[in-house]
């Protein structure tokens, strides 16, 4: 009989409730690191996985432990691990096939892990991996953002937006962003040069000739973003639709590749007519990039933004809070018990 010895929060059916369950301890491979979870960041991706929105491209076997961000302490290492030792304080976005940070422990591939920034606590560190890697891969890898260029970051007060604004300023860009009026001063403090109230202003009427747009909203927002670019400019979308390059990256079957190509064919066609580009980004795990992000945090370039903290036992309530929105930066669940931002 299998012994269940660890608590976790799982979804047993798509669109079903998140519930606490007892699950087997993680299996630690030769190149894996076993981490005691001290904090885990919440992302809209967690809700999308629960709702089954990505089940065609991320076909998890249910029940599935949720959670895509983690900070914690190393309590074990595989035989081939060389970079980490028991007692190290680390953080990661586990690989997309090995998620499950809403648990007491998780095994993570050594290549996906990094030492957490020394200047922040576990809760702040846990808020970073997915959104910071998204910002890095969009602005540095895909966008090749350079000093003097102009970038529009949508939803600047959100998890990705708060980090992307800071990173873009560090790279020397002029940064515009869309937020509600109550967050205008907040994003200016992060470094935004142009702040647009999305409720009362139309960014398409105010901006023109931008080099890059980071779009986290999709739909009409994506279509309008194409029209604020200079010729040769690029929109990087993280809300979809997926493009053929992403399908190839996944190694998808032919029918799924064709379906993804069809989903984005309209927006890619309209982009070509405007002389601009559209690319879909589904960020990937990377310990090496996280090490660069660690340096930026410890040098004061990037500041984690944590809006709310829930206890581990309140993970269900934390997930429900994603639907309400409104929190600046990230929401985090924590096994630490001394945060002054803890939700009631």
Image (cartoon, rainbow, N blue to C red):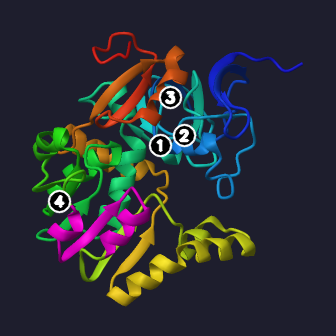
In front of the other: 87 or 232 = 232
Q: CA distance from mark 4 to mark 3?
A: 30 Å
State the residue at coordinates (22%, 45%): 180
User: Label 4 neighbourhood size at 10 Å, few (<14), some (14-19), many (20+)?
Assistant: many
Name of the residue lying farthest toward the right: 1
Where is mark 1, residue-wise?
44
Bounds of the magenta segment: 202-226
Q: Earlier in the sequence, mark 1 or mark 4?
A: 1
Where is mark 4, residue-wise?
176
Q: CA distance from mark 3 to mark 1?
A: 11 Å
Give the answer, above or below, for where 4 lies relative to 147. Answer: above
**Quarter containing the N terminus:** top right
> Circle 4 — which element?
strand
State the residue at coordinates (33%, 35%): 326
Q: Is residue 326 left or right of residue 130?
A: left
Image-quadrant location for residue 71: top left
Give the answer, above or below, for where 335 lies relative to 111. Answer: above
Q: Is residue 313 left or right of residue 124?
A: right
Image-quadrant location for residue 168: bottom left
Disc 1 to disc 2: CB gap under 8 Å: yes
> Residue 19 placed where, x, y %?
65, 23
> Circle 1 — which element?
helix
State the residue at coordinates (49%, 59%): 282
Where is mark 2, residue-wise?
47
């Amino acid at each position: 009989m299998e012994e269940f010895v660890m608590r976790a929060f799982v979804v047993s059916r798509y669109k079903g409730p998140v519930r606490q369950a007892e699950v087997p301890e993680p299996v630690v491979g030769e190149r894996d690191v076993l981490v005691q979870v001290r904090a885990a960041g919440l992302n809209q991706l967690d809700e999308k996985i629960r709702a089954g929105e990505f089940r065609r491209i991320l076909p998890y076997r249910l029940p599935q432990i949720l959670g895509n961000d983690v900070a914690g302490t190393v309590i074990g290492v595989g035989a081939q691990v060389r970079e980490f030792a028991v007692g190290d304080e680390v953080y990661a976005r586990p690989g997309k096939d090995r998620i499950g940070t809403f648990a007491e422990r998780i095994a993570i591939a050594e290549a996906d892990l990094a030492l957490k920034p020394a200047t922040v606590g576990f809760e702040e560190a846990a808020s970073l991996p997915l959104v910071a890697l998204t910002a890095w891969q969009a602005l540095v890898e895909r966008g090749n953002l350079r000093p003097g260029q102009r970038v529009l970051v949508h939803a600047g007060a959100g998890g990705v937006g708060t980090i992307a604004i800071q990173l873009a300023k560090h790279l020397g860009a002029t940064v515009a962003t869309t937020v509600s009026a109550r967050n205008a001063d907040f994003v200016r403090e992060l470094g935004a040069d142009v702040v647009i109230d999305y409720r009362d202003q139309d960014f398409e009427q105010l901006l023109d000739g931008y080099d890059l747009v980071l779009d986290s909203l999709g739909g009409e927002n994506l279509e309008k973003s194409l029209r604020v670019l200079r010729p040769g400019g690029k929109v990087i979308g993280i809300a979809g639709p997926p493009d053929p390059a992403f399908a190839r990256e996944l190694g998808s079957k032919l029918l799924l590749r064709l379906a993804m190509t069809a989903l984005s064919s309209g927006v890619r066609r309209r982009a070509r007519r405007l002389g601009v580009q559209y690319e879909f980004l589904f960020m990937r795990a990377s310990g090496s990039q996280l090490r660069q992000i660690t340096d930026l945090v410890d040098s004061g370039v990037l500041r984690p933004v944590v809006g709310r903290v829930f206890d581990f036992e309140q993970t269900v309530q934390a997930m429900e809070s994603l639907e309400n929105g409104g929190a600046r930066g990230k929401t985090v669940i924590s096994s630490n018990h001394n945060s002054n931002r803890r939700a009631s």
